[in-house]
Image (cartoon, rainbow, N blue to C red):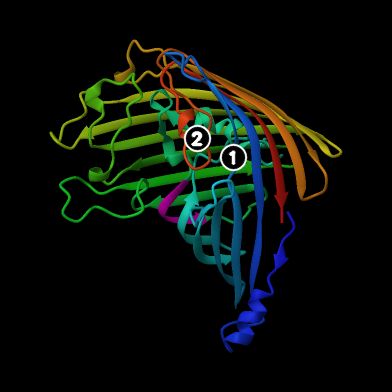
Amino acid sequence: MQKKLLAVAVAGALALPGAASAASSVTITGFFKLSYAWTKVSNQTGGASQSQDRVQDESSRIYFRVVEDLGGGLQAIGQIDWRIAMDAGQDGASGANWVGLRSKSWGQATLGRHDLHYIYTEDQSYSRGGSLKGTNTSIIAFSAGGVFAIANATRTPNTIVWDSPNWKGFTLKAAYSTNPYAASEADIGSTVSDGWALNLAPQYNAKNWGIGYSYWQGKNDGSNFTIPANGALPAGFNVPAQIKTTGNRVNGHYQWGGFRVGVVWDQAKIKCQNLASGLPCGVSTVSKRNAWSVPLRYDWGKWSVFGHYSWALRDKGDAFQNLDTKAKMFAIGGAYSFSKRTKIALEWAQIKNKEDAAYNLFTNVGSLGSNSNAVTPGQDPSQLALTVTHNF
């Protein structure tokens, strides 16, 4: 990705004397990425249509990054991650936005919205040009039969994060959120304890291999959350509740030349408390599931092929006793790079849900997909996508 120093920094200094100095800079970078996709949700009932074609944005974005040298090896840093849904003509600063300080000796500390826990996937299909919906996040970031995202499966708001320096390949991310599931707080006047989240993620990367671990635990501000129902949960679980989520993830990879193989193990737990009664939601552990993923990638010249096989085991939570919530996902694709900035990719991805599972392709519903692509337990989503990416 080529980064260009903005002339805006200079222009701003001329327009507002004293507002900028030679020791500060603003950089703009990002990518535009869209797909033409054929999607299908099988096992529809009543003669309903099962497939459609669509043009879909693939999380296009523009980064505005600021660095100012403060002296003594200390820098002020900041980022606005501006997301653009190019097909719908919508936008918003909903990405990873933060401001803080950085030092070569002690790392960096930032405040804002950050990608935590869910990002350690070892799946490089998206960075190689594939669709976001084909990534293994579809399986390993979700629990409760596929309907609840641990660590949001996106940015976590209200966060303070410390990233260590790189100590000969070893790094550590430590994060705390004052409310991980909502932008605003809801503590004062509440009869339940306030929300919070913790994330610790040590990672080690050598020349040809790497291994890492991520621990997540979080709880919402109790009055603003509802456990989603997927058709398999008893009706009593679809109540306002305070939940506590726990995630453990181990990731690793090995690379021989252009070939790279990864492996991920993920465990997710959900506990909840009914706000109406102050008692647990009839059970101690709503959901507890293990998931695995094996991503592969091979690069040669301007070509790249990628894919993964991922699977979620049966949920062992008290709410899922005697329910078959297993799911498996297969994705394979290839990309050709016209240049260092522009590439085109073709990818096939499919999820097979058992009768009580409702896992879906990542971001398949909503602003980056179509609401008609929602799935109910036992339905199987799939996608064939032709994706164009331009980095700048």
Quickly name the residue at label 1. Answer: 56
Q: Residue at x 34, y 10 (%)?
A: 322
Q: Main secondary structure of the magenta part?
A: strand
Is residue 176 positioned above or below 326 on the image? Answer: below
Q: Bounds of the magenta span?
A: 155-162
Q: Amino acid at mark 2?
A: Ser
Whether residue 23 appears in this view of the structure is no
Label 2 close to label 1 by CB (< 8 Å): yes
- Residue 311 falls in image quadrant: top right
- Helix, strand or loop at disc 1? strand
Horizontal relation, residue 86 to residue 332: left or right? left
Q: Is residue 156 magenta?
A: yes
Quickly name the residue at label 2. Answer: 370
Is residue 280 positioned above or below 31 on the image? Answer: above
Q: Residue at x 50, y 35 (%)?
A: 370
- Residue 7 falls in image quadrant: bottom right
Q: Amino acid at mark 1?
A: Gln
Q: Residue at x 56, y 65 (%)?
A: 102
